[in-house]
Image (cartoon, rainbow, N blue to C red):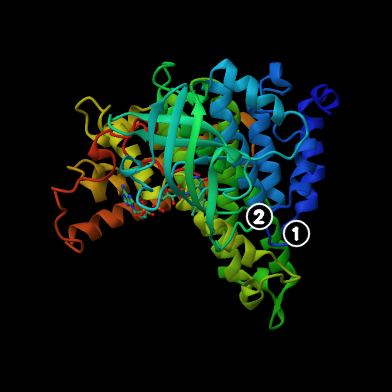
């Protein structure tokens, strides 16, 4: 099947994905696990090919990975997540770091048109944000490794054929990634009824497998900085946001133009226009992030230096996704509280988007990590001065001319989370300015987005003042969490990741 697909230009290829993804339109597509035959439509349109190298029949394209997710998410946010899980979360680490024997065994199967699925199993009932608490263990046995444990919340729990399983050495402080086939001993013992993202199956998975030696991806041995393993899927949430919010913005305007409240069109009401402007600003910010993803990052190369940018992309994009879905639902009134309303997709948008600030690293933790990253690099400068010179934030500081001196104080855990949010907003302003300059975007879209982000930073300053009133009391110095807790889980670059 792939020969025809391999000769297409990027635009033709994405148009093919778009045509197939339109069949999954969230306005009409059933809220149920995606059947294999429907996944087959996308696989045959080539949705996995950008992730795969050419020697295994792939198109090997970072930009197409981003655009495929954006396209899928515009039709159906859950479909965008489905694509991210199979590509960036599960296949990409194999493409980048598995040995040749494991690649030969697995990757050609994914370019052949069969509706195979793959997932990543890291989270456990007792180990979510702090993965170093995981109890799934591996031991060396004759010819390979035995891995035993319990995972939960894996996307595609009961349907993925191939798994990347993260486990800890039985006795040593050492982590390993293993490529596992479901039929080797990956059993789904309970299915969860998730609030949204109904196209994906989630649940509890028991693992008792023995895999041959070549199925271990030893990130450290291959000289890989393991931070990299999570960054592609995390940053693709911004691409999903770009597609999703383009649609939400379009549909919110259409709804408000069509709805009459009394004798007035809803879209003529002042505060409705304010909510629409907030949705539009969110769409602009994610579009700028999508541009950043495509022009500044390369999933196929070393992503480690992109760590701070990815933390900012994920946290700001997902916050915007959730807020815009909430604004849209407010505008659609009671109709937005119905499943399957003929006038809007607000209910589904709200339920599908809610988890974005939780999964793939909860936002509070990622914000803390972003602040910690800057604090360790500021070389004795006050944080505000560091940010004024740091390439990811300097253009924003220069443009906004906002007082950031509230950041120049000792930052305990809660203040690091808040500071990380402010840094994320500054990064977003920089991205929006860059996008506008490089694409010649309409200033009527640029400046409202900048002003909404300025307001977000002012909001963080107000939260610093609120904290100073003593509302949370003293922090417990004996229980450090987050970035302050050191680096016991190497794959995430710190103790805490959260995946999927
Ligand atoms: C829909 C969905 C899909 C998922 N997909 C996958 C997947 O494919 N594979 C996989 O392995 N896992 C997956 N997960 C698991 C997901 O990554 C975890 O839920 C996430 O890491 C959070 O872990 P937890 O649920 O145990 O929450 P906890 O670790 O208990 O955290 C709960 C809350 O505590 C707070 N918190 C924690 N740490 C900090 C901190 N440092 N600073 C401030 N606040 C903090 C935050 O508010 C956080 O939201 C998925 C989860 C969901 C809901």
Q: Quadrant of residue 255?
A: bottom right
**Residue 46 in view here:** yes
Can you say which quadrant of the picture contains the N terminus? Answer: top right
Please tell me whether mark 2 or mark 1 is closer to you in this view. 2
Q: Are the residues flagged by discs 2 and 1 in contact, CB closer than 8 Å?
A: yes
Q: What crowding class fits label 2: few (fewer than 14 Cα within 10 Å), some (14-19), or many (20 or more)?
A: many
Of residues 129 and 331, the one drawn nearer to the viewer in this rendering: 129
Q: Earlier in the sequence, mark 2 or mark 1?
A: 1
Instruction: State the residue at coordinates (46%, 24%).
Output: 144
Q: Residue at x 50, y 39 (%)?
A: 234
- 368 vs 110, left or right, is left
> What residue did someone put label 1 on?
29
> Residues under labels 2 and 1: Cα distance?
10 Å
**In the current view of this chain or complex, which residue is farthest to the front?**
142
Is label 2 within 8 A of ligand 1 (CB to nearest ligand atom)? no
> Where residue 354 sits in the image (x, y, percent)?
52, 59
């Amino acid at each position: 099947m792939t020969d025809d697909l391999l000769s297409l230009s990027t635009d033709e290829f994405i148009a093919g994905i778009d045509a197939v993804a339109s069949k999954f339109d969230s306005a009409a597509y059933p809220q149920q696990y995606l059947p294999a035959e429907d996944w087959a439509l996308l696989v045959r349109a080539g949705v996995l090919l950008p992730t795969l190298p050419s020697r295994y029949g792939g198109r090997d394209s970072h930009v197409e990975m981003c655009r495929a997710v954006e396209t899928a998410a515009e039709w159906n946010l859950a479909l965008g997540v489905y694509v991210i899980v199979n590509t960036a979360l599960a296949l990409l680490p194999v493409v980048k770091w598995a040995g040749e024997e494991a690649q030969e065994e697995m990757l050609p199967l994914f370019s052949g048109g069969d509706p195979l699925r793959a997932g990543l199993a890291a989270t456990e009932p007792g180990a979510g944000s702090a993965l170093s608490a995981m109890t799934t263990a591996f031991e060396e046995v004759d010819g390979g490794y035995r891995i035993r444990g319990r995972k939960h919340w894996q996307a595609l729990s009961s349907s993925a054929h191939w798994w990347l399983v993260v486990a800890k050495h039985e006795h040593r402080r050492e982590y390993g990634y293993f490529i596992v086939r479901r039929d080797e001993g990956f059993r789904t013992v309970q299915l969860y009824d998730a609030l949204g993202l109904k196209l994906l199956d989630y649940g509890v998975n028991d693992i008792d497998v023995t895999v041959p030696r070549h199925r271990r991806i030893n990130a450290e041995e291959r000289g890989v900085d393991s931070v990299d393993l999570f960054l592609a899927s995390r940053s693709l949430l911004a691409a999903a946001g770009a597609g999703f919010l383009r649609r939400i913005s379009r549909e919110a305007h259409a709804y408000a133009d069509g709805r009459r409240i009394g004798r007035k069109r809803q879209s003529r009401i002042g505060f409705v226009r304010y909510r629409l402007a907030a949705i539009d600003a969110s769409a602009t910010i994610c579009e700028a992030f999508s541009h950043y993803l495509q022009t500044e990052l390369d999933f196929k190369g070393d992503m480690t230096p992109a760590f701070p940018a990815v933390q900012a992309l994920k946290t700001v994009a997902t916050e915007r996704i959730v807020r815009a879905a909430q604004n849209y639902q407010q505008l659609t009134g009671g109709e937005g509280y119905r499943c399957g309303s003929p006038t809007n997709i607000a209910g589904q948008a709200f339920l599908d988007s809610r988890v974005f600030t939780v999964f793939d690293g909860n936002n509070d933790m990622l914000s803390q990590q972003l602040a910690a990253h800057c604090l360790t690099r500021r070389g004795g400068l006050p944080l505000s001065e560091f940010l004024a010179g740091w390439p990811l934030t300097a253009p924003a500081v220069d443009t906004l001319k906002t007082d950031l001196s509230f950041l120049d104080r000792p930052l305990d855990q809660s203040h690091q989370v808040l500071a990380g949010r402010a840094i994320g907003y500054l990064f977003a302003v920089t991205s929006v300015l860059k996008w506008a300059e490089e694409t010649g975007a309409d200033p009527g879209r640029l400046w409202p987005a900048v002003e909404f982000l300025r307001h977000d930073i002012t909001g963080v300053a107000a939260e610093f003042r609120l904290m100073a009133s003593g509302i949370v009391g003293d922090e417990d110095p004996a229980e450090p969490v987050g970035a302050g807790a050191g680096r016991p889980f190497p794959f995430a670059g710190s103790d805490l990741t959260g995946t999927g």
